[in-house]
Image (tube, rainbow, N blue to C red):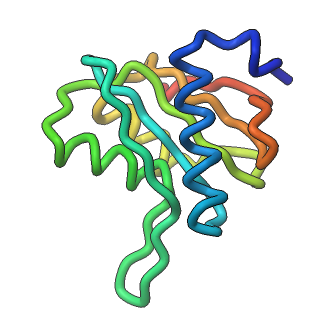
Amino acid sequence: MTDSSALDPEDRKIVTLARSARARNGVPEGAAVRDETGRTYVAGTVELPSLRLSALRTAVAMAVASGAKSLEAAAVVTGESAVSEDDLAAVRDLGGPGTPVLVAGPDGVVGRTVTAG
């Protein structure tokens, strides 16, 4: 477990934004990504009859649609124990294999950091 106060302030910010998106929208996951300019993109899980996207893939899509060229970091707040390979692939596609993905529980405590690798 990573004490949230021990995180870099910018990483703590995306974890907080991801947690807020999850709580505000009452969805299974919240996510936030930070692009190469420091802009953040926040999303929750999308579950429509014709479209299903995880929060992390939605946040990456929002970054791409807004003109981001790369990612510095990503965060996902989830009750799941792992980040799916599809989610990591989306982060990797935009940010590269070394992009850190902070994985936090519903309480916002980062349990681990993985790379998009």
Q: Name the outermost residue toward the bottom.
A: 49
- Give whichever of 109, 16 is nearer the camera: 16
Q: Position of residue 26 (x, y in %)?
A: 64, 69
Q: Residue at x 57, y 66 (%)?
A: 25
Left or right, 44 with respect to 103, comes to left
Q: Residue at x 26, y 24 (%)?
A: 70
Q: Position of residue 23 (x, y in %)?
A: 66, 58
**Which corner quadrant of the image does residue 82 belong to?**
top right
**Image vertical order of residue 25 relative to residue 55, above or below:** below
Q: Name the outermost residue toward the right.
A: 1
**Image vertical order of residue 91 relative to residue 21, above or below:** above
- Give whichever of 12, 1 is nearer the camera: 12
**Image vertical order of residue 80 relative to residue 70, above or below:** below
- Image quarter where the N terminus lies is top right
Q: Position of residue 78 (x, y in %)?
A: 70, 51
**Total count of labels:** 0
Q: Position of residue 62 (x, y in %)?
A: 28, 49
Left or right, 112 with respect to 114, comes to right
Q: Residue at x 76, y 15 (%)?
A: 5
**Which corner quadrant of the image does residue 91 belong to?**
top left
**Image vertical order of residue 68 relative to residue 57, above or below:** above
Q: Name the outermost residue toward the left.
A: 67
Q: Residue at x 77, y 49 (%)?
A: 106
Left or right, 72 with respect to 94, comes to right
